[in-house]
Image: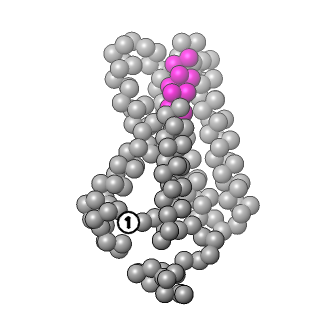
Amino acid sequence: MLAHATRSDGHVPVPGSPAPLAPAPGTEAGVAGEGASSATLAVSFIRYLDVILVVASTPFVLLASLPAAGFAIGAGAWILTRFGVSFIERRAWSARDFRVRAALHLAAILGRVWLVGLAVLLARFTVGTPDGIAAAVVVLAAFTVELVIKIMLRRSIAATLRRPS
């Protein structure tokens, strides 16, 4: 019975733990081939599409004479908090204590909301109303893109985890 539960690389799955992700088609389990690296690059591109779109929209904001200071404040706050939350979430998932894990996730979520909100208020009260609106628009657009991407990736990851190993 244990022979059926053991994978070809000798790994014995622990009951209750999620199944490991299957290797990309055309690659072996322990070797990262071109297919695996391009798939990893594609997933990273999709995962950070919100940041890519914020950076890519910068020339259009400048060419259209839109409030550049507000856009810069909103974009900077979004990018800073996006990578900060990713860092904190990696720390949280590696924590062994459930309370530490929950506290880190909560701090990441609430800290991001506060920092982005304060950035929008900073743009509004230091530069002006149009810049505050520009900061709010860039943050809202980036949040919408990130939310859609997370929903799409969550379904594909959940389907991968349900697959038998």
20 lies above or below 146: below
Residue 91 location, quadrant = bottom right
Viewed as shown, does residue 83 lie left or right of 122? left
* Residue lying furthest left: 34
**Magenta extent:** 133-143
Viewed as shown, does residue 20 lie left or right of 26? right
Q: Mark 1 points at which residue?
A: 23
- The answer to if 94 sits in the magenta stretch is no
In the picture, which quadrant includes the N terminus? bottom right
Secondary structure type for disc 1: loop
**Residue sitting at 35 percent across and 49 percent down?**
42
Q: Residue 62, position in %: x, y?
A: 36, 18
**Of the pair 126 and 52, the residue shown nearer to us:** 52
**Residue sitting at 40 percent across and 49 percent down?**
44
**Residue sitting at 30 percent across and 54 percent down?**
38
Main secondary structure found in the magenta portion = helix
Residue 37 location, quadrant = bottom left
